[in-house]
């Protein structure tokens, strides 16, 4: 009975992957990697085997990966490549040393433009390849739909949502779908080594119209400059330039159903 370990299990994506896997496989096959004893204790209270390890400590990772057949490698939350690349090298090296046979890695859309993801993808291809009995599957996750929706809902209380995206489309994906996709890739490895996971594209004009319909009052899309969009500004600029509009059927094919739409995510958020 093959075991599956999820790294970054205390994080938003990692935790969602744990939940998705727990719904599919017996708990005794499930392992999680966390950095702190309280986090480990919380998982153990739920009947999940937890192991302590840190991306900055290769020895701890080798110990944590012992006896693990399949690894769901959630990328480091640290974006600085000077930190992320050594962390990821440690994870891959430890997985090889521990005898892990298959790795599912959560990469990102436009990975070629990110030294951390690009280096990790190349390293996994070199060390694991992609075969029937062993190998690596790269999941290039789109940007999560939920943060865009949550910000818009917060703004909508005054009758408007703002963006610097103009009429540019964003092909994002629900966190729930991405977690389910990772769980499926870990339990039934896809035929292809690299998958582009994005859902249906949407625009802020469509988001404003959807919120108007759901709230039963007018909510407009107000266009602002990149600075005014704050943390979302860089992504809005990419959208305005048409760089986030490219869709993909990979997510739907992996899930075996249509991905969640913008409307699905909005309605879920309104029910929270």
Image (cartoon, rainbow, N blue to C red):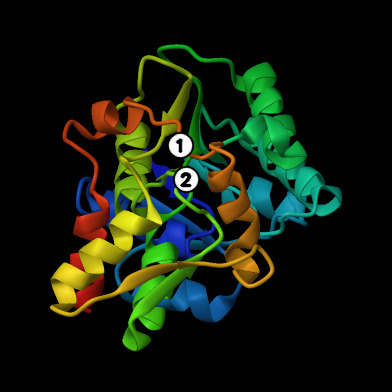
Residue drawn at (63%, 65%) of the image: 225
* Image-based side of 48 in relation to 238, left or right: left
Which mark, by number, is residue 245?
1
**Image check: 161 left or right of 8?**
left
Up the image or down, 37 lies above or below 93; here it is below
Name which residue lies at 75% across and 51% down. 59
Residue at 67 percent of width and 37 percent of height: 117
**Residue 86 visible at all:** yes
Q: Secondary structure at mark 1?
A: loop
Residue at the bottom extreme, as displayed:
158
Q: Can you say which quadrant of the picture contains the N terminus?
A: top left
The percent coordinates of residue 47 (x first, y second) are 30, 67
Q: Quadrant of residue 113?
A: top right
**Alpha carbons under labels 2 and 1: distance apart:** 7 Å
Question: Is 129 above or below relative to 115?
Answer: above
Question: Label 1: how many residues lie within 10 Å, few (<14), some (14-19) or many (20+)?
Answer: many
Kindly identify which residue carries mark 2.
168
Q: Residue furthest right?
A: 82
Query: Who comes first in sequence, dot 2 or dot 1?
Result: 2
Q: Looking at the picture, how far across and down is residue 100, in whole percent?
A: 54, 32
């Amino acid at each position: 009975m093959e075991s599956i370990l999820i790294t970054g299990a205390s994080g938003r994506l990692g935790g969602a992957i744990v939940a998705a896997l727990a719904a599919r496989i017996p708990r005794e096959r499930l392992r999680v990697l966390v950095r702190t004893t309280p986090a480990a204790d919380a998982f153990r209270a739920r009947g999940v085997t937890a192991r302590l390890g840190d991306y900055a400590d290769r020895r701890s990772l080798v110990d944590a990966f012992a006896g693990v057949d399949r690894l769901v490698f959630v990328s480091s939350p640290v974006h600085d490549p000077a930190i992320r690349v050594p962390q990821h090298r440690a994870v891959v090296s430890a997985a090889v040393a521990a005898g892990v046979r298959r790795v599912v890695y959560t990469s990102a859309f436009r990975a070629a433009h990110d030294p951390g993801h690009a280096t990790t993808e190349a390293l996994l291809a070199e060390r694991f390849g992609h075969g029937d009995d062993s190998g690596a599957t790269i999941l290039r996750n789109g940007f999560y739909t939920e943060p865009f929706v949550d910000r818009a809902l917060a703004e909508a209380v005054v009758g408007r949502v703002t963006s610097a995206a103009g009429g540019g489309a964003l092909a994002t994906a629900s966190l729930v779908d991405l977690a389910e996709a990772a769980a499926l890739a870990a339990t039934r490895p896809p035929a292809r080594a690299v998958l582009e996971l994005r859902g249906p594209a949407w625009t802020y004009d469509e988001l404003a119209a959807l919120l108007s319909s759901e709230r039963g009052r007018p909510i407009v899309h107000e266009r602002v400059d990149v600075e005014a969009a704050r943390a979302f500004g860089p992504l809005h600029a990419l959208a305005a330039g048409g760089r986030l509009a490219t869709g993909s059927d990979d997510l739907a094919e992996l899930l075996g159903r249509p991905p969640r739409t913008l409307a699905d995510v909005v309605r879920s958020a309104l029910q929270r």
